[in-house]
Amino acid sequence: MTSVVQCNTVDVDGVDVFYRSAGAPTAAMTILLLHGFPTSSYQFRNLIPLLAPKYRVIAPDLPGFGFTNVPQALNYNYTFDNLANTIQAFVNALGLKQFAVYVFDYGAPVGFRLATSKPDQISAIISQNGNAYAEGLTSFWDPFKAYWNSSSVFDPTVSSPEAQNMLQFLSEGSTQWQYTTGVPKAKLPGIDPAAYTLDSSLLQRVDQNITQLSLFFDYQTNMALYPVWHEYLRTKNPRVLALWAKNDPIFGPAGAEGFKKDLKDVEVGFVDTGHFALETDVEVYAARIDTFLQSVVKSGKHYPNV
């Protein structure tokens, strides 16, 4: 097996999906890593090599992020339903039969859509501030709620005061704030400025304002699906590790604790860091994920992608 990260693309219904991968296809388990806003699979650059000696690890860039290319001629509608449809098609294109899914931020609503549409393809869920409960939403979301209440449909002109207010979240300062807020002073040197600089640069591309505000507006559909996701957790009872950054200003600890309401067997833990936990504590996450997945492998409730 190789821990060297490979960068590839695959055409999925006209979308050129960029992804990072490492590990052998015959590994004991495949892990699908789903990133959040405003980053990309680059978020997992340090985690992938740590997991690859034992697992096949695949991290795609969601449409609208990173290096995934969505031709304008497609008139792609940036909703979470469509992101999930594209990633499901990506999974199919790679021939993945079953996999553990790591969900973070935007990756959570995508991952839970994959799980509820095809439960048997999910062997385990790793949630790193990947929210599925209303109580996990902090006051950070207040401007989003005002935006949702300002109109019944998304307005691509971005002309309303509420929409204009949302543009603040696309600024370089906002991106850096997400990386640094809640991180203990002693851990701040672990944050690579290249990460938030890359994110900020990619947010400056043509049409990013409309793309990102479309997703901001559509995020409310995720909250409407929370009951569906809870029913999935109760009835399918998947193995779940909820290892959250306890100082995340966006998704609070109550979101991790929420899993206990719907699951018989869930591991909940907290790491003393901020939203982008892998920047400061990647070795902690790699070790906990490995221990967790080895227990899943031993349970026999999965099969490799061979």
Image (tube, rainbow, N blue to C red):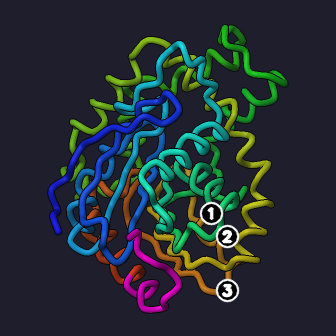
- Residue 170, horizontal then vertical, whole percent: 47, 24
Residues tagged 1 and 2 counted as in contact (Cβ below 8 A): yes
- Give residue 258's mark: 2
The one of 272 and 29 positioned closer to us in this rendering: 29
The residue tagged with tag 3: helix, strand or loop? loop
Please tell me how crowded label 3 is: few (under 14), some (14-19), or many (20+) other residues with Cα within 10 Å. some
User: SS class of the residue under badge 2?
Assistant: helix
User: In which quadrant of the rendered view does residue 149 lie?
Assistant: top right
Amino acid on which the number 2 mark rests in the picture: Gly
Look at mark 1 in the image and give the residue it sits on.
255
Q: Which stretch did the figure color magenta?
A: 294-306
| Quarter of the rendering occupied by the C terminus | bottom left
Instruction: Please tell me which residue is depicted at 42% across the width and 41% down the height of the picture.
Output: 178
The image's mark for residue 264 is 3
Q: Amino acid at mark 1?
A: Gly
Left or right side of 228 for 245: left
Q: Secondary structure at mark 1?
A: helix
Find residue 202 and report its image quarter.
top left
* Pick the front one: 290 or 9: 9
Q: Earlier in the sequence, mark 2 or mark 3?
A: 2
Examine the structure image and report whether residue 303 is included in the region drawn in magenta. yes
Single out the residue that lies furthest toward the right: 152
Q: In the visual, does 106 lie left or right of 31?
A: right
- Name the spot of residue 131 as percent of width and height, x first: 60, 57
- Determine if residue 106 is in view: no
Which is nearer the eye, 70 or 36?
70
How would you rate the neighbour count of disc 1 (Cα within 10 Å): few for under 14, some for 14-19, many for 20 or more? many
- Foreground: disc 2 or disc 3: 3
Q: CA distance from mark 1 to mark 2?
A: 5 Å
